[in-house]
Amino acid sequence: MKEMIQCAAVLAVSLALIPCLVFMGVKGGTREGLTVGVYFNASGEVKEYTEDEYLTGAVLAQMPADLSEEALKAQAVLARTYIYRRYEDESEGPTPSLHGALISDDDSVYQSFFTEEQAKNFYGEDWDKARRRVEKAVRDAPCILTCNGEPITAAYHAASSGSTESALTAWGQDIPYLRAVDSSSDAKLAGIESKTEMGSVDFSKKMEEQLGVKLTGAPAKWVQTEVNERGYVTKLVLGGTEVNVQRFIAAAEVASPCFKCEVKGDTLCFTAKGYGHLVGMSQYGANSMAENGSTWEEILSHYFTGCKTEDIH
């Protein structure tokens, strides 16, 4: 039986491009015993967490806690790597908008994070089990992932279309360890294909409001795409104007850049495969590898070409 994708918290974080490229900060003079300050925008408060407390909240928000233990460990390593990469970046100068903190709860800019209350609300009666599983994963994989001695860009997404994509294709940045790799187990997941439909009036309004493109003429000519051999949209022309593919899928609420567009009458119909930007680690691909006996080290080695794990202790 195909495994059903859980896409609640995971989808919210995996669709965002910025959280994978803007790194979160860590407060402290050394890399041991770090304290992570989080600025909460609604209240204007800054709250501080130990490294393990923060990582537990981050992983709970990023990956379903009932996935395999080795997959959870791989995610914990990525979450910790994100912290340490941001530490290097933030040490060059504080970010004014964080008001003395090192990260905010704005997950359109920073990596997703659950407070204990948010995690309890999300997991409900499974909260205690989820917390214990994630805390164990954080403890058992006290490492970061590095390339040339530096913490990597810790990119991940919920599920690929059957292959991940390179950072060069997705973002125009040639990052050596973010290459397209096989993740064929994702293609067997139930729900890997999703559909989004929108009437032409609503679609036109959204594109003008969010992308600044005014659409005229027949809807059948509005969306023109070029795709690579994996079906990933590499170029998108909207009403005669080339637009960023990642920005477009966010505006159109399409699940991934691996999509096709059809126009049926007055409705634009998008069929997508995968969930997220498809760069870096596929969380469900990692889960499949774990179920087939792979360790968290092997999972990360597969998805991040040529990287090494570094023990922080």
Image (tube, grey):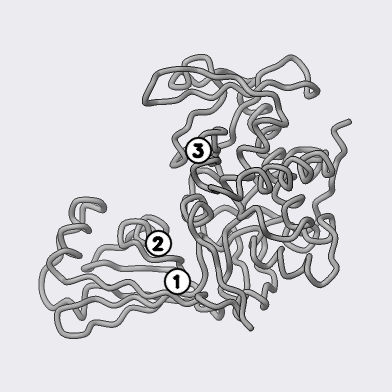
Can you give x and y, in whole percent of width and height, for residue 184 in the image? Answer: 67, 78
> Can you identify the residue that label 2 sits on?
245
Lower sequence index among marks 2 and 1: 1
Q: Which mark is residue 118?
A: 3
Q: Which mark is residue 59?
A: none
Can you give x and y, in whole percent of width and height, for residue 61 in the image? Answer: 56, 45
Distance, label 3 to label 2, CA atoms, is: 32 Å
Residue 73 position (above or below residue 239): above
Lower sequence index among marks 1 and 3: 3
Distance, label 1 to label 3, CA atoms, is: 35 Å
Q: Residue at x 61, y 27 (%)?
A: 25
Lower sequence index among marks 3 and 2: 3
Look at the image and tell me whether residue 146 can be seen: no
Horizontal arrangement in the rendering, residue 255 relative to residue 140 (left or right): left
Q: Quadrant of the C terminus?
A: top right
Instruction: Name the amino acid type tagged 1.
Output: Val
Look at the image and tell me whether residue 310 can be seen: yes
- Disc 2 element: helix
Instruction: Name the amino acid type tagged 2.
Output: Val
Residue closest to the eye, 110 or 21: 110
Q: Quadrant of the N terminus?
A: bottom right
Horizontal arrangement in the rendering, residue 103 relative to residue 311 (left or right): left
Near mark 2 (Cα within 10 A), the count class, few <14, some 14-19 or many ≥20, is: many
> Can you identify the residue that label 1 sits on?
233
Horizontal arrangement in the rendering, residue 301 relative to residue 65 (left or right): right
